[in-house]
Image (cartoon, helix red, strand yellow):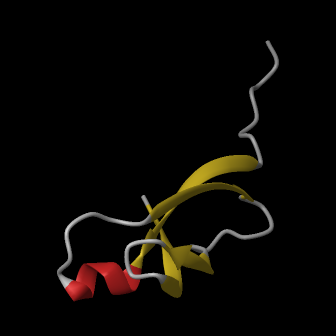
Amino acid sequence: MAKKSKEARIQVILECTEHKESGMPGTSRYITVKNRKNTPARMELKKYNPILKKVTVHKEIK
């Protein structure tokens, strides 16, 4: 039988880092896709946080 390979593209969740520190209720999360082979480390992107009403750093969570 042929061996199944791991898919290169996986779905990841990005969560706001500043929102946790602010203590406000709710959370800002985005779902995106990344290529596991090209970016093995965790992603960090600047995205808009509608609760804080500004652009903040969102980090990949597991």
Given residues 39 and 56, the one toward you in this image is 56
Residue drawn at 66 percent across, 68 percent down = 40
> Residue 6's spot in the image, x, y percent?
71, 40
Given residues 24 and 10, the one toward you in this image is 24
Q: Quadrant of the C terminus?
A: bottom left
In screen coordinates, is 55 left or right of 37? Answer: left
> Residue 59's spot in the image, x, y percent?
49, 75
Residue drawn at 20 percent across, 68 percent down = 25
**Residue 55 position (above or below residue 47):** below
In screen coordinates, is 41 left or right of 34? Answer: left
Residue drawn at 24 percent across, 87 percent down = 21
The count of marks equals 0
In screen coordinates, is 37 left or right of 21? Answer: right
Given residues 22 and 44, the one toward you in this image is 22
> Residue 11's spot in the image, x, y percent?
62, 48
> Residue 2's spot in the image, x, y percent?
82, 19
Location of residue 35 (image quadrant): bottom right
Location of residue 24 (image quadrant): bottom left
